[in-house]
Image (spheres, rainbow, N blue to C red):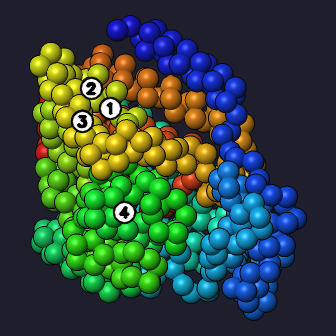
Amino acid sequence: MSRRSLLAIPIAVFAIALAGLLIRGNGESKLPLPRAQALHAALADPLVHKQLASRGWDHARVGPLDSKLARVTFFDGPHLRAVAAVDAHGVVEHTQVYVAGAPQYGSRLSDAPWLLALLAIGFVLATATLPLISLRNLDVVALLGLTVPILAGDHQLLELSVLSGYVPLAYLCWRFVHRATRAAEPEPGTPLYKLLTTRVLPYGIGTAAALLAIVAVTSPGAIDVGFASTAGATLLLHGTLPYGHMPPDVVHGDTYPLLNYVLYLPAAAIAPVRDAFDDTSSAVLVAFAAALVVALALRGSGRRAVLAWLSFPPLAVAVASGTNDLLLAAALALALAAAARGGRSALALAAGAWIKLAPVALLPVWLARTRGKPLLRGVGAVAAVTATLTVWILVLGGTAGIGHMLHALSFQLSRGTLQSAWALLGLGAAQQVAQAATIALVAWAALHARAHKLDAARLAALSGAVLAALQLSASNWSYLYVVWLFPCAAVALLAERREVTAGR
C-alpha cells in the first residue's frame, strides 16, 4: 500500500467521523430537572448538608448524570467536597462525600506516599538507563508522571487529578506512534540497576509482589466498580443477568459486558454481594490475581518488564480498589504474549472486549496484520467468544437480555461526568475532534498493520497508541485506566529488545 493511501484513507475517515459526531451532538442527556431545584435538593440532603457545614463550599457544578439523574458537585476552591445524584422529582438517590486524608481509590496503604515512593524507586531501577538524557528515560518519566493524579485525587483536587494525567498520556500516545513507525530503535543504554547488583531484579520482583499481596489483604474492600462486578456475579450464580437487576447502592453497575461479571464469579462464591453492607474484599483478590497474570504474561519481555509492572505505582492502587481494569490488563497482556499466534491472541483480545469495550478498537488492527489461515483462526476465535457469551445471555434472559445489555452498555456513550479535561474545561467541540481523530487513528493503525510486517514491539505500539487515544478522547477518565495501557508500554517501550519476538 502506498504512502499516499496510508494518509488519504485516515484523513477521509476523520472527516466522515467528525461530520457524524457533529450531527449526533455530544450525546449528553438533558438535565431531568431545573438546575436550581437540583441544587436545592442536594443541599437539603442530611449527609451533604453535614459535610458542607463542616468543610465549607463556595461553588457547585450541576450537570446530567443520565436521562433520569442530575449530578450536583460541590467544591471549596479547587477541593472536591461532595457529590449528589438527584432524580427528576428532586429526590436525592445517591451521595458521596470526600474526607481529607481518605484515598479517592484504593486504601490508605496503597496510596501512602512512602509506598508510592518506594515503588517508584523500584520502577526507575527496572527501567531507567545511562546516560540519563535519553528518549527511553523520558518514557520512564511519563509513566511515573501518572502517579501525580493519584496524589492530587487523594487531596480532593479533582481538576489537577484529571488534567495532570493528560500530559503523560498525550506524550505516550505520540511515543507509541513514533515507535510503531520505526522498524527498530537504538538499543537503550546501560540499565541503571547494574550500578548496584544483577540480583536487584529477582529480589525486586519478589519484594514488589509481596508488597502487592500485603496491599490486597489489607484493603478494606473494593470501590464501586468491584462492588458492582461482584454483585453482578452474585446474580449470575442465581441464574439472573446483571442488566436491570443490580442493587440500587451503586449507579449504573451493569454497564460492563458479560464476561466481566463471569470473571468475578469466584469472588461472589466466596462472599456474595447483594448490597453496600456486604464484604467486597474478595473482589480485591480477583484484581490481585489478575495483576499476577499480567506479570506472568510479561515474562517474555524480560525480567525488567516484570519488575516495572509490579512496581508501577498505579498498580498498587488498582489492586486495593478491586477494579476490573486489571482484568482488562490481563487480557491485553495475554494477547501480546501470544502475538505470534493469530487465533490465541485474537481470543484474548476478544475476551478483553467482553470485559470492557476498549479492545473493540484494537480488533481491526490485530486482524489486519494477518492473512490466510491465521486470519481465519483470528476471526473464528472472536466469533467463538462472542457466540458463547451471547448464548449465555439468551439462556438467562432470552432475546430481551441482549437488548437490556446493550441499553446498559450505552450509558458509557452518554454519561455525564466531570472526570475529563473536556468537561472540566468546557471543550465539548474539541472533544468531538479528538474522538474523530481517534477513529482515524484506528484506521491508520489497521492500514499500517496490513502494509508492514510487525514484530511484537511495533504491534504493541500500535495498540498502545489506540488505547491512549481512547483514554484521551473519552468522556470519563480515571488514573485506574492506565494499568490496561501498561502492557503495551512494557512490550513496546520497556522490554529488552532481544527478548521481543516477531510473528504474524
Residue 63 in which image quadrant: bottom right
Which residue is located at x 23 percent, y 31 percent? 383
Task: For residue 491, say whether it is visible.
Answer: no
Which quadrant: the N terminus?
top left
Residue 304 in which image quadrant: bottom left
Q: CA distance from mark 2 to mark 1?
A: 6 Å
Q: Which residue is mark 3?
A: 387
Q: CA distance from mark 1 to mark 4?
A: 26 Å
Cβ atoms under marks 2 and 1 closer than 8 Å: yes
Point out the tag, 1 or 4, that comes first from the N-terminus: 4
Q: How many marks?
A: 4
Query: Which residue ends up furthest to the right in the rendered image?
Result: 36
Which residue is located at x 28 percent, y 64 percent? 238
Which residue is located at x 57 percent, y 72 percent? 153
Point out the tag, 4 or 3, that comes first from the N-terminus: 4
SS for callout 4: helix
> Which amino acid type is marked by label 4?
Gly
Point out the tag, 3 or 1, that comes first from the N-terminus: 1
Q: Which residue is mark 4?
A: 232
Cβ atoms under marks 2 and 3 closer than 8 Å: no
Please give left or right for residue 349 compared with residue 356 in the image.
Answer: left
> Which amino acid type is marked by label 1?
Leu
> Which amino acid type is marked by label 3?
Ala
Point out the tag, 4 or 2, that comes first from the N-terminus: 4
Please give left or right for residue 448 compared with residue 421 in the image.
Answer: left
> Which amino acid type is marked by label 2?
Leu
Q: CA distance from mark 4 to mark 3?
A: 20 Å
